Image (cartoon, helix red, strand yellow):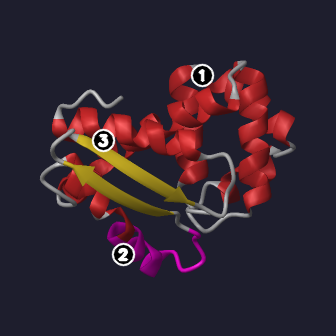
Amino acid sequence: MYAYIPLIWKDMVLTMTGPETWAKILLEAGIWSEIEEPLLNKKTRREDLIFALFGATCKEMALSQDDLLRAFGRHFVSFTLRTGNGTFLRSQGCTLAVFLENVNTMHNYMKRDHPDAKFPFIESKYDPVADTLLLTYLSIREGVSPLLLGIIEEIGAHLYGLLVS
């Protein structure tokens, strides 16, 4: 899994609730302090640790899986913009439709630095008459489509001034 996920996950939890909740999540997930630092060192992670963090976060924050994934998708974009990657994201397209057409190219670019990462595939079809997008999301990870919804909502709002529904 993409190596920045644990770092962004921690940032989301700290932003939403604070360090006490993060400590409880680590404990619930069975991740003690000796492995927290290596977990956050930006190398490709074992997915079982990521999913343990996810489950513990759902429990500690009393959120459904869908709500947590959607919130994480939104936070992922905000974090990316806040940490100096806004120009890179903006360069992916002048409209949301073009941006979404370029997501797979962006993932291929990122794969060079993270060869073990398993990025999803997104197919985007824009209907200019109805002004709608039809997305097909393919991932080896089941049940994570709410993450995509959160990402698209936040990309739409921050990069294109759109309210995505």
For disc 2, the marked residue is 109
For disc 1, the marked residue is 18
Q: Where residue 89 sits: x, y (%)?
A: 25, 55
For disc 3, the marked residue is 155
Residue found 53% across the figure and 37% down from its top? 72
Query: Is residue 120 at least partly visible in the picture?
Result: yes
The CA distance from mark 1 to mark 2 is: 34 Å
Query: Is residue 23 at least partly visible in the picture?
Result: no
Q: Is residue 48 left or right of residue 127?
A: right
Please give the range of residues in magenta. 105-118
The CA distance from mark 3 to mark 1 is: 25 Å
Q: Where residue 37 sits: x, y (%)?
A: 67, 53
Q: Could you say whether the residue bearing mark 2 is in a helix, strand or loop?
A: helix
Residue 113, picture quadrant: bottom left
What kind of secondary structure does the magenta stretch mostly adopt?
Answer: helix
Q: Could you say whether the residue bearing mark 3 is in a helix, strand or loop?
A: helix
